[in-house]
Amino acid sequence: MNDEKLTLYPPWKQALAELELAGIEPGNTIEKQWLEERFGLKPALTIADAEKNRLLFRTLIWQLRNSLLHQHRLMLRAVGGVGYRVVEVEDQTSTALRDRGEAVTRELNKLMEEISYVRLEVLTDAGRKANSDAIAKISSLQGMAIKKLGFRE
């Protein structure tokens, strides 16, 4: 065998193997440049290449994040301009609730907006009832999210 390193495929598995070898722990930071190298991304020469790299990076980091979460119970969070940080164990629950709670609240607000601005005059009685029921359900979900989980609108 030559001096070449064994490269696992897909590339996120290579990154995972190297992180495991290095003994990844909560509090560690993984630089984006390091990830791009492990993922085999080449510097983009065109806008199309840059977009292709961005989409491929997103796919591979998603797979790496899922694997770290499921296999090692380690959660990654993006650190702007740096890369990714492994969330401290004692912060994992609050980080997940905050990040995902904000996303849930945003989506519930979008849903409420979309079902509130309906041309009711065009709907049948059954259609208006279905819309009214949907508004009540989503309103209830919004209230629960705010009250039970402490999310703000």
Image: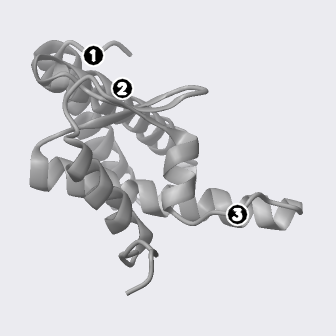
Nearer the observer, 20 or 131: 20
Name the spot of residue 142 as percent of width and height, x first. 27, 26
Residue located at (18% from left, 39% from top): 74
In screen coordinates, is 75 left or right of 62?
left
Do callouts 1 and 3 mark residues in contact (Cβ within 8 Å)? no
Q: Is residue 139 visible?
A: no
Residue type marked 3: Lys
Residue type marked 2: Glu
Residue type marked 1: Phe
Front position among marks 3 and 2: 3
Do callouts 2 and 1 mark residues in contact (Cβ within 8 Å)? yes
Compared with 120, 136 (above or below) is: above
| Residue pointed to by mark 1 | 151
Where the C terminus falls, by quadrant? top left
Q: Residue furthest right?
A: 46
Spatial distance from mark 2 to mark 1, Cα to Cα?
Answer: 7 Å
Name the spot of residue 73 as percent of width and height, x first. 11, 43
In screen coordinates, is 105 left or right of 140?
right
| Residue pointed to by mark 2 | 102
Helix, strand or loop at label 3? It is: loop
In screen coordinates, is 105 left or right of 68?
right
Name the spot of residue 64 as percent of width and height, x first. 33, 56
Picture quadrant where residue 32 is located:
top right
Residue neighbourhood size for the residue with mark 1, other residues' Cα within 10 Å, grouped as few (<14), some (14–19), many (≥20):
some
Q: Is residue 114 visible?
A: yes
Helix, strand or loop at label 1? It is: loop
Helix, strand or loop at label 2? It is: helix
Residue located at (30% from left, 33% from top): 100
Determine which of the numbered discs, if any, sits on residue 42 in the image.
3
Mark 3 vs 2, N-terminal side: 3
Mark 1 vs 3, N-terminal side: 3
Where the N terminus falls, by quadrant? bottom left
